[in-house]
């Protein structure tokens, strides 16, 4: 269905959502195929270069991941700052209730 469309779907339509999903799924499959078919590096220098290339490739292929990580990082930082402003947690031990002796 995705491959047989003659015109782009209307913005906001269910068909557009399906097309975006199919496109993203194919990108992920291509990325995973690239990772799986890549030869292993023989030296540490080549491994470092390969890591850098993969990071660049990943950023180019999935730019929204970086933005999502930034948002998540900012959210976590806000939560931590809010909790830090509340001060330390105070824990008070409860007294154990006294037991009544049972009659036998």
Image (cartoon, helix red, strand yellow):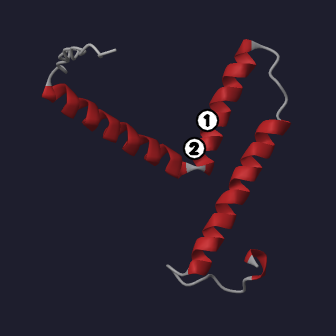
Q: Position of residue 26 (x, y in %)?
A: 73, 58
- Front residue of 34 and 53: 34
Whether label 2 touches label 1, CB < 8 Å:
yes
Disc marking residue 32? none
Find residue 27 and report its image quarter. Answer: bottom right
Mark 1 crowd level (few <14, some 14–19, many ≥20, 10 Å Cα): few
Up-down relation of residue 32 to residue 54 (above or below): below
- Front residue of 65 and 50: 65
Determine whether, in the image, residue 67 is placed left or right of residue 31.
left
Determine whether, in the image, residue 42 is placed left or right of residue 6.
right
Q: Which quadrant holds the N terminus?
A: bottom right
Disc marking residue 59? 2
| Cα distance in 3D space between marks 2 and 1 | 6 Å
Determine whether, in the image, residue 7 is placed left or right of residue 65.
right
x 62%, y 50%: residue: 61
Residue matched to label 1: 55
x 67%, y 21%: residue: 48
Most extreme residue toward the left is: 86
- Front residue of 73 and 37: 73
Q: Which quadrant holds the C terminus?
A: top left
């Amino acid at each position: 269905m995705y491959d047989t469309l003659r015109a782009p779907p209307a913005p906001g339509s269910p068909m557009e959502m399906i097309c975006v999903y199919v496109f993203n799924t194919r990108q992920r499959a291509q990325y995973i195929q690239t990772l799986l078919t890549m030869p292993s590096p023989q030296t540490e220098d080549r491994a470092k270069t390969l890591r850098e290339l993969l990071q660049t490739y990943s950023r180019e292929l999935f730019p929204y991941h970086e933005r999502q990580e930034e948002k998540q990082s900012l959210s976590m930082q806000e939560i931590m700052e809010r909790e830090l402003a509340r001060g330390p947690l105070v824990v008070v031990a409860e007294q154990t209730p006294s037991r009544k002796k049972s009659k036998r």
